[in-house]
Image (cartoon, rainbow, N blue to C red):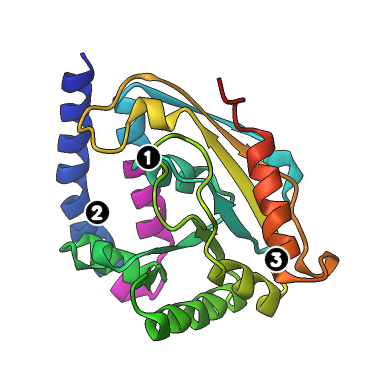
Amino acid sequence: MAAIRSLITFSFWTLMVPIAALIGFPWTFITGRIDFLYRFGCWIAITGVRLAGVRPQAVGLDRLDAASTYIFMSNHVSNLDPPMLIPLIPRRTAVLAKKELFRIPILGRGFRMGSFVPVDRNNREAAKASLREGARVLQSGINLTIFPEGTRSRDGRLLPFKKGPFFLATETSVPVVPITIVNTDYLWPKGSICIRSGTAQVTFHRPLHPADFPTREALMEAVRQSIESALPEES
């Protein structure tokens, strides 16, 4: 059944992305507004997740001010994380994402229209430019979602964090919302093409204000502790 559900999900995403582009791109060009395309993209993402039999459970959304702009920082253990997480975030969010995703036809164009920010992890100067672009996104009032580990963890435990996202937070003074995603490493393991059915919990922790911390390292440690607080204990 997992293989069948996975095939249905991948087929749905493959079919719906060009349909979204066919409808959403002209609408965006005509109106100058990305809202419809963004909502359509979120619907495609979360519907595919649910077709795979995955049931997201969001905890802690009541800790957020819907009118505020945040930097959301989440652990990352599965390719299931972005399509499940982004539709749960209040209001629109852009994403700091690896540059390879922007080379995918149609999808990459949609990312750029949505103010998603490409990151080249192997080029220091390009990474700095990405942070400057991220700051511009935040200044425009759009949330920003970042996976500070920079890649997926194979065992569900937190990897070392990249420093760039915390430099961005302190430079912009935008509150950071740590997020803990649990069980997606089991539902869609790294290296597997099959998605298992089941429940994934997404915990939104209380916002952390950069001004409350003496250094970027202190903020980084606080974010790490928040995320770890909702991870299951190691067996």
- Give the answer, above or below, for where 82 lies relative to 190: below
Tell me if mark 2 has few (under 14), some (14-19) or many (20+) residues whose alpha carbon lies within 10 angstroms of its own.
Answer: some
How far separated are the C-alphas under marks 3 and 2?
A: 41 Å
Quarter of the figure with residue 28: bottom left
**Residue 45 image position (x, y, % from top left):** 34, 43
Q: Residue at x 42, y 71 (%)?
A: 115
Q: Quadrant of residue 210?
A: bottom right
Residue wearing tag 1:
78
Relative image position of residue 231 (x, y in whole percent): 60, 32
Query: Image point 39% across, 25% down: which residue?
Result: 186
Q: Residue tagged by mark 2?
A: 20
Q: Secondary structure at mark 1?
A: loop
* Magenta segment includes 37: yes
On the image, numbered disc 3 is attached to which residue? 217
Q: Quadrant of the N terminus?
A: top left
CA distance separating discs 1 and 3:
26 Å
Give the structural element (helix, strand or loop) at label 3: helix
Q: Is residue 28 above or below residue 13?
A: below
Q: What's the residue type where badge 2 is placed?
A: Ala
Residue 157 is covered by the magenta coloring = no
Q: Which mark is on residue 191?
A: none
**What residue lies at 16% left-to-right and 44% top-to-bottom?**
14
Q: Pointers 3 and 2 in contact (CB under 8 A)?
A: no
The amino acid type, in three-letter code, at marker 3 is Glu
Q: Earlier in the sequence, mark 2 or mark 1?
A: 2
Range of magenta residues: 28-45
Q: Nearer the viewer, residue 145 or 34?
A: 145
